[in-house]
């Protein structure tokens, strides 16, 4: 018999993965070109040319014993120093290699930091809608995830007053995901300041430390020249979790980092514990080849313009059909209101037109759906008649 905990996690499964598998079944039945699968956040843009060149160069030119061997559990010191310097140059921070721990993607980093911080029963706050895996990650360490609804009328920006009310003596962390999956919203500097003020105030009242865990796999995907605030500059108890999954289209390679600033309460204790957590969770260390690769490719960028074209095509196409969408500023998701308020009916009706997207219930926010536009522009264009037919089903257009 499996554990009760895993029994629950298995039962809840992943609606997004299930949808993806359904998409493959439908593609077999109707033909690939006739199915419009917007379910998964798997980048469709290939990694930059330099990434592929560097993989080949590293494999060819590095001593294999060195290339594939174990290293310090935090990662190669030289790689961590390079990442630290790059952050300092971009954001005016003062990280050294000591502040950087290389991780197995953002998911690995989140698990490492939650294992490091949480005692059983500790509370972790998150603004909903949110990436539902957070619930599993927090449950891994017997923490309790508490969702605070972001304000719909405020374009799904976080609500400082609701945050204040949600904080208790057991609050250990707030997970912030900016740019946001699933809404595509970017939290402004003003919002981050508001959140920081609330946290500072409540920490003082309660005599506790409350950490922001800033989950940033979409940091580089911001449009219209909008800046994504670097949160350590607003709040000292911030731990940044980054990943190259989306920024360099390397999701299967599992590479990211945690940045733990000296200014955070108990910083060195957290760093030392996180390194051990990285080891004992079974990651041991982030993949060695990928560490060396990203250190060579810190200046590389994915084709944000291509995502931007998709963003505009989909947003304009859907709003022209009468759908209500949140205008996305970042990531590669469009957050669309279910015309009759029922996201599961919306998902089912869309399937009838061979369109696949994910209901907001999968992000703890029913009434909306998430459309992932990390797909080919061609597919978006071909899907428009199907979206029109869907809009007709709802009487949005004739
Ligand atoms: N956090 C968010 C908000 C995500 O959307 C994802 C992946 O889609 C992750 C974390 C995990 O990313 P990684 O592939 O870096 O583990």
Image: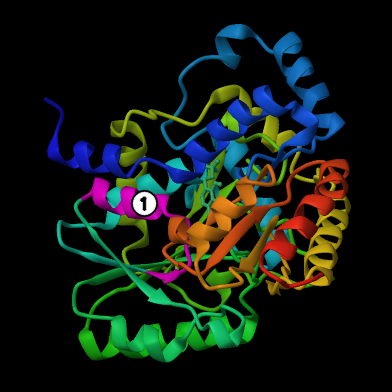
Q: Quadrant of residue 229?
A: bottom right
Horizontal and vertical percent position of residue 270: 33, 55
Which residue does the numbered mark 1 point to in the structure image? 113
Q: Is residue 175 above or below residue 296?
A: below
Q: Which residues are magenta?
A: 126-141
Mark 1 C-beta closer than 8 Å to ligand 1: no
The answer to whether any part of residue 271 appears in the image is yes
Image quarter of the C terminus:
bottom right
| Left or right: 143 in relation to 52 | left
Horizontal and vertical percent position of residue 323: 72, 70
Q: Is residue 232 above or below residue 359?
A: below
Label 1 sits on a secondary structure element that is helix
The answer to whether any part of residue 260 appears in the image is no
Horizontal and vertical percent position of residue 286: 49, 31
Whether residue 129 appears in magenta in the rendering, the answer is yes
Applied colour scheme: rainbow
Q: Is residue 367 above or below residue 239?
A: below
| Left or right: 296 in relation to 14 | right
Whether residue 108 appears in magenta in the rendering, the answer is no
Q: Nearer the viewer, residue 38 or 182?
A: 38
Residue at 35 percent across and 56 percent down: it is 268
Q: Quadrant of residue 56?
A: top right
Q: Nearer the viewer, residue 245 or 339?
A: 339
| Left or right: 395 in relation to 155 | right
Q: Nearer the viewer, residue 190 or 72?
A: 190
Residue at 32 percent across and 48 percent down: it is 136
| Left or right: 380 in relation to 36 | right
Horizontal and vertical percent position of residue 8: 22, 43
Image quarter of the N terminus:
top left
Q: Residues within 10 Å of mark 1 (few under 14, many from 20)?
A: many
Residue at 58 percent across and 68 percent down: it is 338
Residue at 69 percent across and 74 percent down: it is 324
């Amino acid at each position: 018999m499996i554990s009760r905990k895993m029994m629950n996690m298995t039962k809840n499964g992943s609606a997004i993965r299930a949808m993806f598998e359904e998409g493959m079944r439908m593609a077999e039945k109707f033909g690939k070109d006739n199915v419009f699968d917007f379910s998964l956040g798997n980048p469709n843009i290939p990694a930059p040319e330099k990434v592929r060149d560097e993989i080949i160069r590293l494999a060819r030119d590095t001593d294999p014993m060195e290339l594939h061997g174990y290293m310090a559990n935090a990662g190669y010191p030289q790689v961590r120093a390079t990442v630290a310097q790059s952050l300092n140059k971009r954001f005016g921070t003062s990280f050294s290699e000591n502040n950087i721990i290389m991780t197995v993607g953002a998911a690995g980093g989140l698990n490492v930091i939650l294992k490091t911080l949480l005692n059983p029963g500790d509370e972790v706050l998150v603004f909903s809608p949110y990436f539902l895996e957070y619930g599993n990650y927090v449950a891994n360490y017997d923490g309790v995830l508490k969702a605070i609804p972001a304000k719909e009328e405020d374009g799904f920006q976080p609500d400082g007053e609701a945050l204040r009310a949600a904080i208790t003596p057991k609050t250990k962390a707030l997970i912030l995901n900016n740019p946001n999956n699933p809404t595509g919203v970017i939290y402004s500097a003003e919002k981050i300041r508001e959140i920081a003020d609330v946290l500072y105030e409540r920490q003082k009242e309660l005599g506790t430390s409350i950490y922001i865990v800033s989950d940033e796999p979409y940091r580089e995907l911001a449009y219209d020249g909008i800046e994504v605030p670097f949160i350590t500059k607003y709040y000292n108890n911030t731990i940044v979790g980054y990943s190259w999954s989306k920024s360099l289209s390397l999701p299967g390679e599992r590479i990211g980092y945690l940045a733990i600033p000296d200014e955070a309460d108990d910083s060195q204790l957290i760093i030392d514990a996180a390194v051990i957590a990285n080891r004992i969770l079974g990651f041991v260390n982030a993949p060695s080849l990928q560490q060396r690769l990203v250190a060579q490719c810190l200046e590389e960028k994915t084709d944000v313009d291509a995502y931007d074209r998709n963003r505009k095509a989909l947003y304009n196409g859907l709003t022209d059909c009468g759908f209500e969408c949140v205008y996305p500023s970042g990531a590669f998701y469009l957050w669309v209101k279910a015309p009759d308020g029922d996201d599961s009916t919306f998902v089912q009706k869309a399937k009838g037109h061979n369109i696949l997207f994910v209901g907001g219930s999968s992000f703890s926010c029913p009434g909306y759906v998430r459309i992932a536009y990390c797909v080919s522009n061609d597919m978006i264009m071909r899907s428009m008649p199907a979206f029109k037919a869907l809009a007709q089903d709802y009487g949005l257009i004739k």
